[in-house]
Image: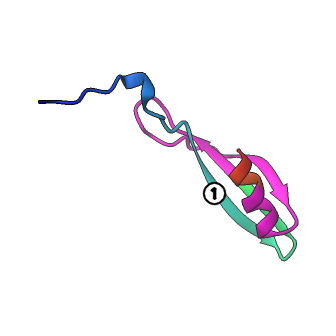
Amino acid sequence: MSTMMPLDQFQQLRHVDEIIEMAADSWWVYRRNIGFNGALSSTARVVFFGRSKAQVEQWMATV
């Protein structure tokens, strides 16, 4: 007996986020896209910045 699941029910990763502390009160979230071949983009873009790590983590939890 086998169990089959349709492919459209899988959540595929489209990007990877990285939190970087630029200063004591400056936290940035960089995003790199993942290509169809699974490779990370060589360029990153800033998608959010906050004044504390907690603020950035709270934003990431809502995305």
The image quadrant of residue 49 is bottom right
Q: Residue at x 43, y 32 (%)?
A: 10
Magenta-highlighted residues: 30-58
- Residue 4 point in image, percent of width and height: 26, 26
| Residue 41 colored in magenta in the image | yes
Which amino acid, by three-letter code, is at mark 1?
A: Glu
- Residue 13 point in image, percent of width and height: 50, 39
Badge 1 local density, few (<14 within 10 Å), some, or many (20+)?
Answer: few
Determine whether 32 is above or below 11 in the image.
below
Quadrant holding the N terminus: top left
Q: Residue at x 88, y 66 (%)?
A: 51
Point out the residue furthest to the left here: 1
Quadrant holding the C terminus: top right
- Image side of residue 44 versus residue 39, left or right: right
| Residue 38 colored in magenta in the image | yes
The residue identified by callout 1 is 18
Q: Secondary structure at mark 1?
A: strand
Determine whether 40 is above or below 9 in the image.
below
The image quadrant of residue 26 is bottom right
- Residue 38 point in image, percent of width and height: 42, 37
